[in-house]
Amino acid sequence: MNIELEHRETWLHQINPSFKLMTLIGLFVFLLFIHYLNWLLYLGLLFFLLLWVFSGYSYRTVSLMILPFFLVFISTASSMILFGKGETTWMKFGLIHITEESFYRGIHVGLRTIVFAILGLLFALTTRPVKLFYSLMQQLRLKPKYAYSFMAGFRLIPIMIEEFFTIRNAMKVRGVEERRGIKHLFHKMKSYSIPLLAQSIRRAHRIAVAMETKGFKGSGQRTYYYRVTFSKYDGYFLGSILFMVVLSYYFSTHLPIFPAEDVRYGN
């Protein structure tokens, strides 16, 4: 079953996966210490532009993938807006207490969540899993037994989806009716999960036996079918990230959208 989406290769696909992963982890940590709302807003817009233009996927596909992020934004921001601390009260009704400080703090928390999601989506769309694990073995010295285990598990996902439809079609042929509702949800999960789990265990055992038969060892020196190296695109990626951080800070100081600056309570 082919579940791969059509896309074109861009320079983001040429970046060393380990370098991209470590850069994004460092960026995640850096984002945790940004407490200026306008800076985070402009940074999020620039990251979204990077994803929108250079992910290699169609604008429609990227838009559909981003839509659920707004629900995450609303859920994370609303809890802080409705129940946060603050001195300038805008509205108070029972336990709900909306203040100016809690409003901007909530927007900030929601924006941080959506920026994390955009960067995670950027990594997922522009990184081939096989190249990632080969890079982790070659650059970060990940043991082959872990890398090949993850690759085998990742390979099983489309097979399990195909088997799910096969089991469902087999049930239809045998006249088993799918009843809807929460009451029948447990029975439906049991009907599908047990055969899927049994098939996965059987297939994983066959893969393990085949790998051991061909002389696979979990550690030690080995050769690789793919050689993942560094290139000029790694420098482009790091330079673009630094440029966007500086540019967003410049915009936040000269063209602020929100009147709030540091959203931490008491600052």
Image (tube, rainbow, N blue to C red):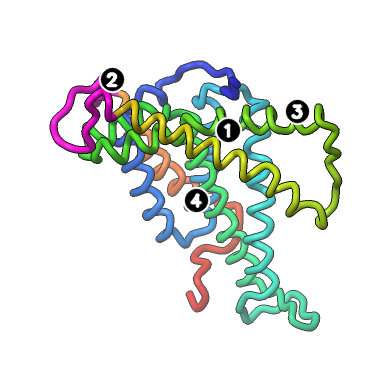
Q: Residues within 10 Å of mark 4 (few under 14, many from 20)?
A: many
The answer to which image quadrant residue 196 occupies is top right
Q: Are marks 1 and 2 in contact (CB under 8 Å)?
A: no
Numbered circle sitting on residue 226: 2
Identify which residue is drawn at 25% across, 34% down: 137
Mark 3 vs mark 4: in front: 3
- Say which residue label 4 marks: 252
The answer to the question of whether label 3 and label 1 lie on touching residues, with beta carbons closer than 8 A, is no
The reply to whether callout 3 and callout 4 are in contact (CB within 8 Å) is no
Q: Is 221 colored magenta in this rendering?
A: yes
Is label 1 in a helix, a strand or a loop?
helix
Give the residue number, with chain letter if any, for mark 1. 160
Residue 226 on the magenta span: yes
Q: Dot 1: few (<14), some (14–19), or many (≥20) neighbours within 10 Å? A: some
Q: In the image, what residue type sits under mark 2?
A: Tyr
Quarter residue 241 falls in: top left
* Amino acid type of the residue tagged 1 in the rendering: Met
C-alpha separation, residue under disc 2 versus residue under disc 4: 43 Å
Q: Which residues are magenta?
A: 212-232
Residue nearer the viewer, 115 or 102: 115
Q: Amino acid at mark 4?
A: Ser
